[in-house]
């Protein structure tokens, strides 16, 4: 990764953050919780930026239509997040596989 890639990545991230800041307050709060959840759970494809950008697109459309954010995502934000990444590998999955067993089993 060269210096230009780093600079471009920062430009994209700053533009993304500016879009998030332009959302209504309730949307920003829910987006912040989604972001925290994803940073904790660790979907492997998170760094490519499409997942979070897609959520901002979804939220911008909902805000433009005047819909409440919880109408879009439901009252269980974690379940909404889990549905988004259900077919994506997570760092938790990779860690479990490296341990060589299934969750709940002892060797």
Image: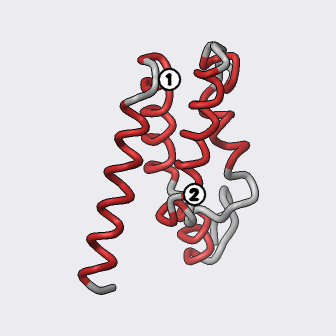
Residue at 69 percent of width and 65 percent of height: 102
| Residue 19 quadrant | top left
Q: In this view, does 66 lie above or below 62?
A: above
Identify the residue under disc 2: 50
Q: Where is residue 96 in the image (x, y as percent from the top left)?
A: 59, 67
Q: Outermost residue toward the front?
A: 64
Image spot of residue 33 (x, y percent): 46, 32
Please tell me which residue is depicted at 55% across the width and 66% down the height of the picture.
Answer: 44
Q: Is 22 situated above or below 81?
A: above
How many residues crowd around disc 2 within 10 Å: few (fewer than 14), some, or many (20 or more)? few
Q: How crowded is mark 1: few (under 14 residues within 10 Å), some or many (20 or more)?
A: many
Residue linked to disc 1: 27
Q: What residue sits 45% from the left and 48% below the top? A: 40
> What whole-number distance in Å separates the C-alpha atoms at marks 2 and 1?
18 Å
Whether 69 is drawn above or below 19: the answer is above
Task: Judge left or right: residue 41 versus residue 83.
Answer: left
First-in-chain label (2 vs 1): 1
Between 19 and 28, the one nearer to me in the picture: 19
With 11 as the anchor, is 72 left or right in this view? Answer: right
Circle count = 2
Classify residue 74 as left or right of residue 20: right
Q: Quadrant of the image for the N terminus?
A: bottom left
Position of 94 with respect to 9 (left or right) is: right
Residue at the (49%, 41%) spot, across then down: 37
Query: Up-down: is 99 above or below 75?
Result: below
Residue 6 lies, in percent from the top left, at 29, 73
| Residue 65 falls in image quadrant | top right
x then y, percent, for residue 16: 41, 47
């Amino acid at each position: 990764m060269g210096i230009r890639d780093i600079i471009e990545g920062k430009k994209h991230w700053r533009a993304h953050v500016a879009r998030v800041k332009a959302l209504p307050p309730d949307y920003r709060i829910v987006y912040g919780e989604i972001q925290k959840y994803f940073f904790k759970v660790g979907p492997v494809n998170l760094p490519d930026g499409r997942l979070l950008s897609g959520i901002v697109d979804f939220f911008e459309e909902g805000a433009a239509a005047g819909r409440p954010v919880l109408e879009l995502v439901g009252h269980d934000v974690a379940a909404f997040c889990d549905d988004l990444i259900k077919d994506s590998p997570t760092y938790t999955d990779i860690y479990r596989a490296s341990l060589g067993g299934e969750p709940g089993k002892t060797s």
